[in-house]
Amino acid sequence: MVHAWSFASQEDCQNYYWNVTFVDEPEWCNATWDQILCWPPTPPNTNVLLPCPPIKGVDPLQMAHRRCGPNGIWLGQTSVGGALEDPDNRGWTNYTMCFVPEVKEFLDKLHSSSEEDAKLKLHVAATGRIIEMVGLSISLTTIITSLFIFTVFRSLRNNRTRIHWHLFMSMKIQLVVRLTLYIDQYIIRSRKMSPLFYKGIDNSPVVCESFYVLLEYARTAMFMWMFIEGLYLHNMVTLTVFHDKPNYRMFYAIGWGLPVIMTATWASTTALLYTDTECWWGYNLSPYFWILEGPRLIVIFTNLIFLLNILRVLITKLKASFSSELHQIRKAARAAIVLLPLLGITNALQIVHSPLESSPLKFAVWTYVSTFLTAYQGFFVALIYCFMNNEVKSALKKSWSDYHSRRDIEDSRRQSVTSFRLHRISERFGHSSKTSSPVHSYSTGSYQPANQRTP
């Protein structure tokens, strides 16, 4: 059976229906390919229905439709004098019924004001994706470098850096999966073909869902380790009696084990109830996604409480140190800014849904700010807690100094060996020239011809 979405061009569509004619109708709408579906030749004043294509965000059980006009021309979407008319004479396909409810709601919000505003918002979203990919790449590079530093230098293996390591590892997994998905989408879309004729992650069953499950697991683990970072820092600053050695079994259960339960619950619910579209497209718009977003939002607010309490304690200690009020505020503000990226409060902007119904300017501000803070979060965390860390700086300086010392010792040893060998060679040849030379032997009377030498 040939499906309406099995065609790749207008020529293929017309060739398939080349022998279809309507004897009773002098004019009819020709076979037309609308980049997705191939519509058959149709008599005038007739509505045609075809099953929706099996692509992301679309329910294949619904029907798309278009109408053939009274003059045998496919009707378009532009209204002229009350009648539908297509300036390109190619017609318009109504896919409105094909979209799943979440996508319909998204499109309604996007086009709530005007088509011009909708185009501007789409342009803003495309620019935001570029900013995001650049930020994710920089974050991944710095996170991998930080993991290498924490792993190689044993002097850095303490409780704080151990927690940092697990947070960075969860960030690394999330960044790798997200960049893989984005690169796959970019490569596929750059071919400018119908999404039905390429093979990528997005339209590969099981593989696609597995990538998104892994992505959400890593993201949930990142939030849990952010909570652990906030809890550990809060206890260090606020508790009078604090045991420096934490309970790592509990930390591992919260950081890596709890996300497994949460992600498995969400994935099972989504697989059973969110079956209208391929690859769970728009799953972040469905109510089931709050199985993950709810606990993440709780983590953000908990870390915010930790942060406010930490600032309260710091301000109290600063007052006790007789600092000026301005200096106290500066120190407290600086501490807050440093803690914000690590504790994940910047992710609150991403959890709140984008203001699609607002003006393009407000949408652009929200998109660029939230994208920048989220995409570059790994970079800021690595910068503040690794590259700007005094312990890390000392370890790197010591390693660099040891490297130069070893290199100087090797150079000195190499020079000594070379000098020693040259000295031995010089002595050998010097001694040989004085004792074994035939001229020298003859001049001292010790030279004997070969036939007179004693055997």
Image (tube, helix red, strand yellow):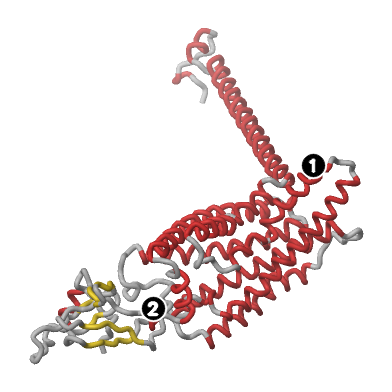
- Residue 448 or residue 419, whichever sits in front: 419
Q: Residue furthest top?
A: 443
Secondary structure at badge 1 equals helix
Residue 177, how many percent across, how many down?
52, 66
Of the two numbered discs 2 and 1 in the rendering, the one whose residue sits closer to the viewer: 1
- Residue 130 or residue 164, whichever sits in front: 130
Secondary structure at badge 2 equals loop
As displayed, is residue 368 above or below residue 55? Answer: above
* Other-residue count near label 1 (Cα within 10 Å), few / some / many at <14 / 14–19 / ≥20: few
Q: Earlier in the sequence, mark 2 or mark 1?
A: 2
As displayed, is residue 314 above or below residue 400? Answer: below
- Which mark, residue 268? none
The amino acid beneath tag 1 is Leu
Q: Does the residue at mark 2 contact the one at mark 1 (Cβ under 8 Å)?
A: no
> Gap between marks 2 and 1, in whole Å?
59 Å
Residue 203, how many percent across, how many down?
41, 76
The residue at which mark 1 appears reads as 326
Residue 298 at least partly seen = yes
Residue 409, how many percent across, how many down?
66, 33
Residue 140 at least partly seen = no
Residue 263, how many percent across, how many down?
61, 77
Residue drawn at 48 percent across, 86 percent down: 275
The amino acid beneath tag 2 is Ile
As displayed, is residue 381 above or below residue 259? Answer: above
- Residue 344 or residue 424, whichever sits in front: 344
- Left or right: residue 232 versus residue 322 is left
- Left or right: residue 11 versus residue 157 is left
Query: In which quadrant will I find the N terminus?
Result: bottom left
The residue at which mark 2 appears reads as 55
